[in-house]
Image: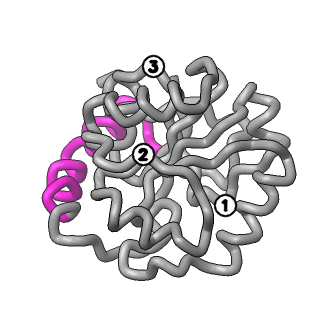
Amino acid sequence: MAIITPTYAVKAIYGLTPEQLRHHGVRAILTDLDNTLIAWNNPDGTPELRQWLNRMHDAGIIVMVVSNNNADRVARALAKLDLPFVSRALKPLPVGINRAVRKLHLPKKAVVMVGDQLLTDVVASNVAGVRSILVQPLIETDAWNTRINRFFEHFLFKLLNHRQPLTYQEDLHGNKRN
């Protein structure tokens, strides 16, 4: 069960503040792209996203996308956001997360991975030895390839909730799960 258990569960990436992240020793956020940072069908993002990214930048917290998508797709989606990224991350394997950590030249304890899927983002984080933050998907629909994961996640959420109910919090305060 430990491999699918997120360190934290937060409603949305926007609930993370520089102050809370610094309190937890976080200097960089690795984030999934689709339905975590932006809606999978809206690559332009939102004004709320831009404000959040500006707050992270002003606080010196690096935001880097770690996505299973190909480089062209990620580059197109991030063109207006000017964020570094690792594509073809191969999540749930730790390959992409490890590649991102090496690029950042930071210890793993200074990095968190934020994502909306247990089977890719959380598992990859846990295998890589990086703290994970599970967020609710930004929208209820998914690309076709993600729907398969959601089907299996339904059963995994039942297992997790049987052990310890998963409650999404507004922020990181008092929210550690393991």
- Label 2 Cα crowd, 10 Å radius (few <14 / some 14-19 / many 20+): many
How far apart marks 2 and 3 lie (CA) works out to: 18 Å
Q: Is residue 136 magenta?
A: no
- Residue type pointed to by label 3: Gly
> Nearest the camera: 67 or 8?
67
Displayed quadrant of residue 11: bottom right
Q: Vertical placement of 57 versus 98: above or below?
A: below
How far apart marks 3 and 1 lie (CA) works out to: 24 Å
* Residue under the point 41% across and 54% down: 116
Q: In the shown orientation, is residue 79 left or right of residue 98? A: right
* Residue under the point 48% across and 34% down: 100
- Residue type pointed to by label 1: Tyr
For disc 1, the marked residue is 14
Q: Vertical placement of 58 versus 1: above or below?
A: below
Range shown magenta: 147-168
- Residue type pointed to by label 2: Val
